[in-house]
Image: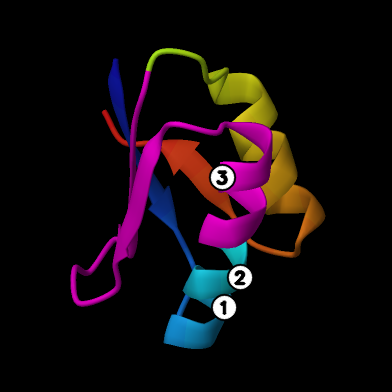
Amino acid sequence: MVEVFKTNVEETSEANKLVALLLQHFPGSKINFDLHDCDKILRVEGKDFMTEKLVMLVHENGFTCKVLE
């Protein structure tokens, strides 16, 4: 399963912290940001992640995150 999200993450350091956090919750997933994209893309690929939980974790850390349609 691959899911792509629009975020408001601006800094590489913030992205790195979120990736580390998300990997703790969804081990074995591939998670990365494209901060050069206008939508500050978060891409997650894996079998065992829940979209709602991922969005909630990002929100709890002060960022917006929604599924990119």
- The type of residue carrying mark 2 is Lys
Coordinates of residue 28 in the picture (x, y in percent)? 44, 31
**Helix, strand or loop at disc 1?**
helix
Q: Label 1: few (<14), some or many (≥20) within 10 Å?
A: few
Q: CA distance from mark 1 to mark 2?
A: 5 Å
- Magenta stretch: includes residue 42: yes
Q: From the viewer's perspective, is the residue at label 3 or at label 1 nearer?
A: 3
**Helix, strand or loop at disc 3?**
helix
Write down the quadrant of residue 41 in the picture: bottom left
Q: Furthest-right residue in view?
A: 60
Whichever of labels 3 and 1 marks the residue nearer the N terminus, that label is 1
Q: Label 3: few (<14), some or many (≥20) within 10 Å?
A: some
Numbered range of the magenta stretch: 19-46
Q: From the viewer's perspective, is the residue at label 1 or at label 2 nearer?
A: 2
Is 55 placed above or below 47 here? below
Coordinates of residue 4 in the picture (x, y in percent)? 30, 37
The label number, if any, that marks residue 23 in the structure image: 3
Foreground residue among 26 and 3: 26
Write down the quadrant of residue 44 in the picture: top left
Mark 1 touches mark 2? (CB < 8 Å): yes
- The type of residue carrying mark 1 is Glu
Q: Which residue is mark 1?
A: 14
Q: Horizontal placement of 35 versus 51: left or right?
A: left
**Helix, strand or loop at disc 2?**
helix
Coordinates of residue 64 in the picture (x, y in percent)? 59, 55
Q: Which residue is mark 2?
A: 17
What residue lies at 43% left-to-right and 83% top-to-bottom? Answer: 12
What residue lies at 31% left-to-right and 36% top-to-bottom? Answer: 68
- The C terminus, quarter of image: top left
What residue lies at 72% left-to-right and 50% top-to-bottom? Answer: 59
